[in-house]
Image (tube, rainbow, N blue to C red):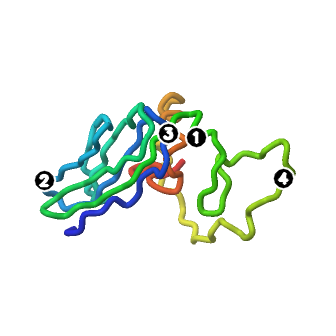
């Protein structure tokens, strides 16, 4: 792969929260600049063609830009770090009210206007994957649940699949 890319990153994250930042790049020297963030670990996934950087957000609220640099290419991701009190303040993003809670003083109206589940062909379960999930203890299974800031549609479990 010759193009440097950050396929997704959290738009807003709670101060001090850990998250995973994927960077798709060729297997060559790669630098990630994340001022204020603590790098907890990293790994290469040949299956996904991406480096995964595990980062802890700063404790200080602010708007941050993370950069990946490789052979003259630059990929950026803008991340808003907010305190819990700031995240609780009502705001609008992409036409939706945040935080997404039913305000008790208002009437409730659904924002869903169409079917959102897609009809994909079903494949039989892979016995090896099923056996892996069945062999795990409760502690391991609970640790598979991502924190609220991570997008649920991406990278739930890239190696064993979603249970």
According to the picture, the residue beneath numbered tag 2 turns out to be 29
Question: Is 63 on the left-hand or right-hand side of 42?
Answer: right
Residue shown at the point (24%, 54%) measured from the top left? 68
Q: Is residue 74 left or right of residue 97?
A: left
- Which of the marked residues, 4 or 1, is nearer the chain's N terminus? 1
* Mark nearer the N terminus (1 vs 3): 3
Q: Cβ–Cβ below 8 Å for labels 3 and 2?
A: no
Q: CA distance from mark 4 to mark 1?
A: 21 Å
Marks 3 and 4, Cα distance to the nearest angstrom? 27 Å
C-alpha span from label 3 to label 2: 32 Å
The CA span between labels 2 and 4 is: 52 Å
Q: Nearer the viewer, residue 114 or 36?
A: 36
Counting residues from the N terminus, which is met first, the one under dot 1 or under dot 2? Answer: 2
In the rendering, which numbered label is found on residue 82?
3
What residue do we see at 41% from left, 47% from top? Answer: 63
User: Sequence order check: which comes first, mark 3 or mark 2?
Assistant: 2
Q: Is residue 4 above or below residue 155?
A: below
Drawn side of residue 43 relative to residue 7, left or right:
left
Secondary structure state at the residue bearing disc 3: strand
Q: Which mark is residue 108?
A: 4
Pointer 1 with pointer 3, Cβ within 8 A:
yes
Any part of residue 100 in sight: yes
Q: Nearer the viewer, mark 2 or mark 4?
A: 4
Q: Residues within 10 Å of mark 1 (few under 14, many from 20)?
A: some
Residue 112 spot, x, y in % from top left: 73, 64
Seen from the viewer's position, the closer of residues 95 and 18 is 95
The quarter holding residue 71 reads bottom left
**Residues packed near mark 2 inside 10 Å, few (<14), some (14 to 19) or many (20 plus):** few
What secondary structure is marked by label 4?
loop
């Amino acid at each position: 792969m010759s193009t440097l890319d950050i396929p997704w990153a959290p738009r807003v994250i709670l101060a001090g929260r850990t998250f995973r930042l994927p960077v798709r790049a060729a297997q060559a020297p790669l630098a990630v600049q994340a001022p204020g963030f603590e790098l907890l670990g990293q790994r290469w996934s040949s299956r996904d063609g991406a480096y995964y950087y595990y980062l802890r957000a700063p404790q200080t609220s602010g708007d941050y830009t993370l950069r990946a640099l490789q052979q003259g290419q630059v990929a950026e991701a803008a991340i808003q770090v907010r305190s819990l009190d700031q995240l609780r303040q009502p705001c609008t993003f992409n036409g939706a009210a945040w935080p997404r809670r039913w305000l008790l003083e208002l009437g409730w109206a659904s924002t869903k206007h169409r079917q959102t589940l897609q009809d994909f062909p079903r494949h039989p379960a892979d016995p090896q994957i099923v056996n892996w999930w069945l062999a795990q203890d409760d502690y391991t299974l609970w640790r598979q649940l991502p924190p609220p800031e991570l997008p649920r549609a991406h990278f739930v479990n890239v190696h064993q699949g979603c249970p």
